[in-house]
Structure formats: C-alpha cells, structure tokens
Amino acid sequence: MEVREIGNSGLKASSIALGAWAIGGGLFWGESDDNEAIRAILTAIDHGITMIDTAPAYGFGHSEEVVGKALQGKRDKVILSNKCGLWWDDDRGSPFSEIDGRKVNVCLRPETINIEIDLSLKRLNTDYIDLYMTHWQSVPPDKTPIEDTMAALLKLKDAGKIRVIGVSNAEVNHMKEYLETGKIDSNQLKFSILDRKMEKEQLQYCIDNSISIQVYSPLEQGLLTGTFGMDYIPTETEYRNKIPWFGKKLRIKVLTLLDGWKNLTDKYNCTLSQLVIAWTAMQPGITFVLCGSRKAHHVIDNVKAADITLSEEDAALMRKDAEALGEPE
C-alpha cells in the first residue's frame, strides 16, 4: 500500500482510506451491523489501510462510537480523520438539512466546535484526532467568520486535541481565507470519474498550495462497481436517490460504459471497483481515496486496487469514455 503525506504536515497515511459514513446507519443507509462494521475496520488495518475517516453527523455519533470500539488497542496504527460543523443540539448555525427527522445546521462557532471536539474524543475513546476538518463551510444567516473558526482550531491544536487542520467541501475562496489566518493541509471533496467538478478550480489551487485532497464517493455509492443493474430501485429515503447517475436514463449509459471496460478488467485481472479506485488514486493532486465499506469482504476487494498500475493510455481512455457521457442536467 502506497503511503502519502497529508499536505506538508509530516503525517502520512495509506493512499486508500476507509470511509465510515455508512457505518453510522440511519435512513440514508439502512441499519448497520456494528459487529460486521468492526470486522471491516479491523480487516482494513490488517490489510494496510492506515486512515479511517468519520464524522459526528454519520449516524449522529454512531459511526464514531463504532470506530472507537474497533480501535481499542489499535489507536496508534491509524490516522483518524474527523470533522466538525454539522450541529443538531439546538438552533445555532444556518439550516443545512433534515436527517432522520432531525434538523441539522452548519455551525462553525468556536463554542460549538469546542463542544464537538470533546464529544468526538469521548465517542472515539481517544485523546486526540489526527486530521480535524470543517465538514461544510459556514453560510448566512449565521455565518461565522473563517478567522474565528481557524482561531478555535488553532487553540485545539495547541492543546493537543488535534494534530492537523483541514477542510471539507471548501471552495477556493474558503481555502484562501483559511490560509490567510492559519494553515490547512487537506480538503475533502466529492470526486469520481463521473463527477469531476472539483477539477475546474479546487484541484489546481490545492496542488499549488500543498493541500492534499481526500476524495469521497469515488464509486458513486456503488454504481461504478457494476453490481446495480437497471432493476435496482432505491428506497425513498436512500441517499442514492440524490445521485443523478442512478436515474434510469443516465444509469443505462453508465452500465454501458462499464461493459466497455471489460477488456480492462481482463487485462489487469481486477474487478470494476478495483479498476475505478486505481484510476482515481493516480489522478494528479489526489492524495487519498476514501472507500466506504461496512463489510470485511468489500474492504479486501478495495485494498487490491493498490496493486494495480494502470498505463497512462488506459487511464486516458477511461477518462475519455467518461467525459463522453457528459454531465447530468
């Protein structure tokens, strides 16, 4: 497994990371078997994955609790990536979404960040978090100035509660403000071979400023694994309903695309998942690929992508094929 640095922080982790969003369960994902999720986390560590990514909002603390249980006696073997800024305890913050019947706000006030970090440390059963990110960026009407948020994060770093400061879903203007008042080493962004929007602006800015990029949803919630045929119908509450590519008109195009890559899976003796993860990991500027999983056999399948080295020609062909699909309207 290749090891890469988080920005220029000195901290390094595996290029393939384990994302623990689905482990939190809830209406988006359905109930999760905690014991199986713990086995998945331990399997990831045993197979060379050294970064585990979670957040308080993943199951309202449940994902953190499961990760914390799995890491008992193994905390020193991983880089814990965590977040703050999605708040549901009261009305502080700006409206974000309703999740599982709860009103969730974006709130990056220093006082709520201080509450969140202590709750996260308790749920994770640890004294520190390696990489701590603002989950989404503050917006009106309750917009906290970035300099105030950064000041709070720097105090947490000075106190030893966090080691590296990062952001998630941050635009270039956000990153510029963070760098004016402190230091960030990572940005977690949505990216897949089908969804390449972050390449337009954020990618080059991150490269120019030594900000590592963690990408999430590289397999588009499983669509790029080839296991979801045209007969699959997401339930009303499933997160996949929010992904345009799961619509029937676009899904048939994606499945046709995947069928056309059979020669590549044969050539590299790999699954579609492994092919797509390997492609993602080799893209310029992308440092870590977050692969969500709550089952051990999925983890093992994903890890094998690290052994695949695509030729530049094949990688370019995959990009060209995906670009030919266009973008969802």
Image (spheres, rainbow, N blue to C red):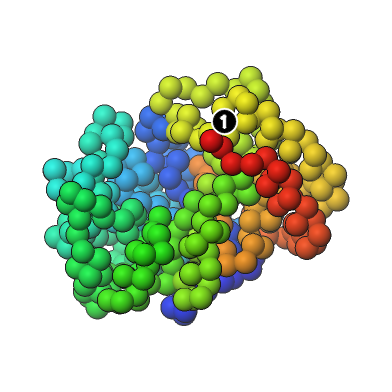
Front-most of residues 222 and 71: 222
The correct choice, above or below, for 55 with respect to 146 in the image is: above
| Visible residue check, residue 43 | no
Taking the spot 74% from the left edge, 33% from the top edge, the residue there is 256
What residue sits 73% from the left and 50% below the top? Answer: 320
Q: Residues within 10 Å of mark 1 (few under 14, many from 20)?
A: many
Q: Amino acid at mark 1?
A: Phe
Residue 81, image quadrant: bottom left
* Residue shown at the point (32%, 59%) measured from the top left: 134
In the image, taking residue 8 as reference, residue 141 lies left or right, namely left
Estimate the x, y position of residue 200 in percent, counting from the top left: 53, 59
Residue 173 visible in the current orientation: yes
Residue denoted by label 1: 246
181, above or below 88, in the image: below
| Horizontal and vertical percent position of residue 82 | 37, 58
* Quadrant in which the N terminus is drawn: bottom right
Left or right placement of residue 124 versus residue 282 in this view? left
Q: Percent x, y for residue 174?
A: 34, 64
Q: Secondary structure at mark 1?
A: helix
Seen in the picture, residue 227 relative to 272 is either above or below; the reply is: above
Report the number of discs: 1
| In front of the other: 292 or 183 | 183
Looking at the image, which residue is at 63% across and 19% down? 231
Residue 298 percent coordinates (x, y): 61, 43
